[in-house]
Amino acid sequence: MNTKAALLSALMTLLSTAHAATGSVTPTTTSNSVPVQVTVVAGAGCTLSTTDITVSGTYLASDPSGLTQTATNAVSVLCTNGAQYQLSAPSSIPLYNTAGTSGLTANLTYTFTNGTVTSAGGTDSYNITVTVPSGQTNVLPETHTGSTYVSITLMN
């Protein structure tokens, strides 16, 4: 056997041995297994949802206490464990009749704070209290509606 043939034979033996170490099979090793590493980067995330609020009762401008109703669990935040978030929303909104010719002001208060919340995972729920203050005049006896947004900011 010449030198080139001997080197080629040795190289083929070395390659087949090295290749078998990575999990291939040969006639003398009919099965093998190799490890597979799977890496997943877990991120913080939250889903914000709200419930529409219907205030029951009739608003009368002469009523000294106005009209107030609390909507329990009107804001829900579903987060992964360790997610940090902040919620924000306006403190008052206008309400109008269908034609837009009559308006009221509703004050909104929330049970969430302005600070950062660190979730333990699962759902955090918050209440919204709607107060229509007394003394608002020139209001037509119709249904008045309005909308606003609750905003979430993910901090991590």
Image: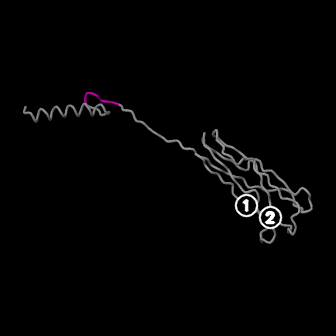
Check the image and report above or below for 91 versus 137.
above
Q: Position of residue 141 (x, y in %)?
A: 86, 67
Determine the residue positioned at 86% across, 56% down.
67
Q: Which residue is mark 1?
A: 147
Q: Which residue is mark 2?
A: 144
Compared across the picture, whether 105 is left or right of 3 comes to right
Q: Residues within 10 Å of mark 1 (few under 14, many from 20)?
A: few
Q: x%, y% of residue 6?
A: 12, 32
Residue 50, how many percent across, how many down?
A: 70, 52
| Quadrant showing the N terminus | top left
Q: In terms of secondary structure, where does tag 2 sit?
A: loop
Relative depth, front residue between 102 and 153:
153
For the C terminus, give its image quadrant: top right
Q: Could you say which disc has been placed on residue 97 in the image?
A: none
In the visual, does 55 lie left or right of 50? right
Q: Nearer the viewer, residue 120 or 74?
A: 120
**Is 113 contained in the magenta span?**
no
Colour scheme in the image? Answer: one colour
Q: Nearer the viewer, residue 98 or 70?
A: 70
Disc 2 residue crowd, few under 14, some 14–19, many 20+, Cα 10 Å: some
Residue 86 drawn above or below residue 64:
above
Q: Quadrant of residue 4?
A: top left
How many marks do you count on the picture? 2
Q: Residue 96: which quarter of the image?
A: bottom right
What amino acid is found at the position of numbered circle 2 in the picture? His
Q: What segment is highlighted magenta in the picture?
A: 27-32
